[in-house]
Image (cartoon, grey):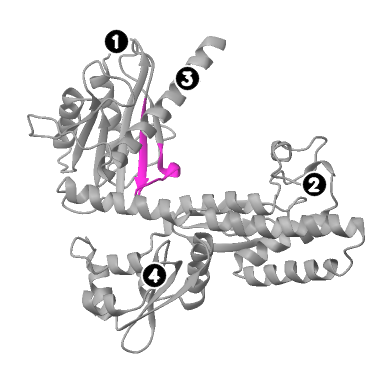
């Protein structure tokens, strides 16, 4: 199929799931989108940067179908359920198992709750897998606004924090019976995650109709109002929730970054580095990792600077943590305690700093005979406010690059820089606190 073929299809702009078929009528790929028409068209845009596997997939597509739904969350769940059912070839081929995440209903706990997990054990009900951890996190936040579940696992004397803000019914402190909790919270969540929203709505409508027949009863009227509110709340929350748009934006930002910066390939793994210290004391370094444009916190690493505490400058500290990090990609044994070996090499490194930090990082890469794209990002001299322009420094370039504030590329680079800074500061404060209190 070519772009003109796609334009002739009457693809709606709703949220939903799309399915690509080959000449044999087999589903070869299933995706989801906040806007079906825009997402499907994007595969055939000239500006799209695809991997060889995706180019091969596009050549095999002979038919496209889609299922439109009412909300982004339903599109996300629909995709997960369809992928689990059909196991399309390219969904399996293009996936990254390390990033998959599941929504778990912990039925074995004293108080069943809703959690995210990357491992599947023998207890509980699991929904997914989901590629976007961000989308999964947003989904369970939205679910809590509709069905206020509790994550305490065991009963306690006082209600949890979420009870105070109306996001838990108080089962943690015995405010409702477990039977009620299962009926009005956990069971509807399981139905919703299974793609049975329409059945939930029909149940509400049937109960509303039944109570409406006895409108002279004050208690019935109160219950009727409560049911109507819950049904309207569910519809409004789902319609206004954006769980795919963020993930899609992050993925598009990575593609845009590769184009703007003329990178050799779309960076699947981006590493960001920063240093935190006070006059060289309690000096630490941070490494954060972004996969597909999203923070991948399980891959974060922190470094306590070992050399020159109180003496070495930021540039020397940066060189130390980069040297230590790169030894993990080496087949040679590495003896630092507690630091895991063989971390994947990044496709792009982002340094918080200017030319001095950039050159230091470049020297470390050259010493290790590595050619990894490198960027340093710094505020203009004397400008520390959020509105001050950020300057991007590249190896071999005399002048810094200033991108428009609205640039998706700049947004992504700043997200990495800010996250590296946050992680470094957090570790530095922890060490200062330890030193202060002995």
* Quarter of the image where the C terminus is located: top right
Toward the right, the furthest residue is 217
Q: Mark 3 points at which residue?
A: 429
Tell me the element at label 4: helix
Of 232 and 189, the residue lying toward us: 232
Q: How far apart are marks 2 and 3 (CA)?
A: 36 Å
Q: Which of marks 1 and 2 is nearer the N terminus?
A: 2
Label 4, residues with CA under 10 Å away: few <14, some 14-19, many ≥20: some
Label 3, residues with CA under 10 Å away: few <14, some 14-19, many ≥20: some
Residue drawn at 37 percent across, 74 percent down: 11
| Nearer mark to the viewer, of 1 and 3 | 3
Name the spot of residue 212 as percent of width and height, x first.
Answer: 83, 67
Label 2, residues with CA under 10 Å away: few <14, some 14-19, many ≥20: many
Name the spot of residue 107 as percent of width and height, x first.
Answer: 72, 58
Label at residue 91: 4
Q: Which of marks 4 and 1 is nearer the N terminus?
A: 4
Q: Mark 1 points at which residue?
A: 311
Tell me the element at label 1: loop
């Amino acid at each position: 199929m070519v772009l003109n073929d796609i334009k002739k299809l009457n693809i709606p702009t709703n949220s939903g799931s799309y399915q690509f078929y080959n000449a044999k009528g087999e589903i070869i790929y299933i995706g989801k989108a906040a806007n079906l028409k825009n997402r499907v068209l994007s595969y055939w845009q000239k500006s799209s940067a695809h991997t060889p596997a995706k180019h091969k997939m596009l050549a095999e597509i002979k038919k496209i179908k889609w299922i439109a739904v009412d909300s982004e969350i339903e599109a996300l769940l629909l995709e997960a359920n369809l992928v689990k059912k059909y196991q399309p070839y390219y969904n399996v081929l293009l996936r990254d198992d390390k990033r998959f995440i599941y929504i778990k209903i912990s039925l074995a706990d004293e108080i069943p709750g809703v959690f995210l997990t990357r491992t599947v054990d023998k207890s509980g009900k699991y929904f997914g897998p989901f590629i976007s951890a961000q989308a999964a996190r947003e989904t369970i936040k939205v679910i809590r606004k509709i069905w206020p579940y509790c994550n305490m696992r065991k009963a306690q004397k006082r209600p949890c924090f979420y009870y105070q803000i109306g996001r838990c019914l108080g089962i943690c402190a015995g405010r409702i019976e477990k039977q009620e909790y299962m009926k009005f919270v956990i069971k509807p969540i399981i139905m919703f995650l299974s793609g049975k929203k329409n059945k939930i709505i029909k149940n509400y409508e049937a109960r509303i109709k039944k109570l409406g027949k006895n409108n002279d009863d004050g208690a019935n009227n109160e219950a009727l109002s409560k049911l109507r509110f819950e049904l309207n709340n569910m519809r409004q929350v789902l319609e206004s929730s954006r769980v795919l748009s963020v993930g899609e934006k992050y993925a598009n930002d990575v593609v845009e970054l590769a184009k703007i910066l003329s990178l050799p390939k779309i960076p699947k793994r981006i590493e960001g580095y920063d240093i935190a210290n006070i006059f060289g004391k309690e000096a630490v370094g941070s490494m954060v990792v972004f996969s597909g444009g999203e923070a991948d916190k399980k891959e974060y690493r922190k470094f306590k600077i070992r050399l020159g505490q109180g003496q070495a400058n930021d540039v020397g500290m940066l060189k130390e943590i980069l040297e230590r990090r790169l030894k993990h990609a080496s087949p040679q044994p590495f003896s630092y305690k507690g630091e895991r070996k063989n971390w994947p090499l990044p496709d792009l490194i982002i340094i918080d700093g200017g030319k001095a930090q950039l050159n230091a990082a470049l020297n470390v890469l050259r010493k290790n005979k590595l050619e990894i794209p490198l960027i340093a990002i710094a505020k203009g001299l004397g400008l520390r406010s959020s509105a001050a322009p950020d300057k991007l420094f590249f190896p071999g370039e005399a002048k810094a690059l200033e991108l428009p504030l609205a640039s998706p590329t700049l947004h992504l680079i700043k997200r990495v820089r800010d996250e590296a800074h946050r992680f470094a500061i957090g570790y530095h404060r922890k060490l200062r606190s330890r030193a202060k209190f002995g």
